[in-house]
Image (cartoon, rainbow, N blue to C red):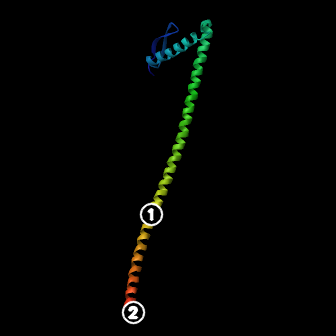
Amino acid sequence: MSPKNDTKVLIGGNVYTLSGDESEEYIQRVALYINNKLDDLKSSDNGQFLNTRLMSVLLAINIADDYFKSKEDKESIEHDFKLKDQLLIEKEREIIRLQEVIHNIEKEKKQLIVRAEQLEENLENYKKELDEYIETFDLGQE
């Protein structure tokens, strides 16, 4: 267990000593956040008419509002990440499927090339046979 940090902070014109496990910088940031919220309340239209108790309640409501909005933002971002992860998985599956299609097309292309070479060879053989036949025919007529 880490030792507690005792940190003096200024909130609403009063000095408080806060004790916590967090760093002094973090505790000062929290105090500054609260102090800024308090200053916002005091500078509002009705801020000068608020008593300490009402000011504390409104401060708590404002902080809770910020908390819930941040929580909703976090949940929305997490939801977006899940959707993007699902989309990424779908795209990866599509890539694999397309790679298989490409592989099959390349395999078929090789088979067609072999078949075309065989047909060319057959054609050459037919041409030779035809030339021989024509030559034989021409010789027979003389």
- Are there few (<14), some (14-19), or many (20+) residues within 10 Å of tag 2? few
- Residue 141 circle label: 2
* Tag in front: 1 or 2: 2
Going by the numbered disc 2, the residue's amino acid type is Gln
Q: Residue at x 46, y 58 (%)?
A: 103
Quarter-of-image position of residue 65: top right
Secondary structure category for the residue under label 2: helix
Q: CA distance from mark 1 to mark 2?
A: 47 Å
Q: Is residue 135 left or right of residue 71?
A: left
Residue 30 at what x, y percent from top left?
Answer: 50, 17
Q: Which residue is mark 1?
A: 109
As drawn, 100 above or below 48: below
Q: Quadrant of the N terminus?
A: top left
Residue 105 at what x, y percent from top left?
Answer: 47, 60
- Are there few (<14), some (14-19), or many (20+) residues within 10 Å of tag 1? few
As drawn, 109 above or below 35: below
Please report contact status of discs 1 and 2: CB closer than 8 Å, yes or no. no
Say which label, 1 or 2, has the lower sequence index: 1
Going by the numbered disc 1, the residue's amino acid type is Lys
Secondary structure category for the residue under label 1: helix
Q: Residue at x 55, y 38 (%)?
A: 82
Q: Residue at x 40, y 79 (%)?
A: 127
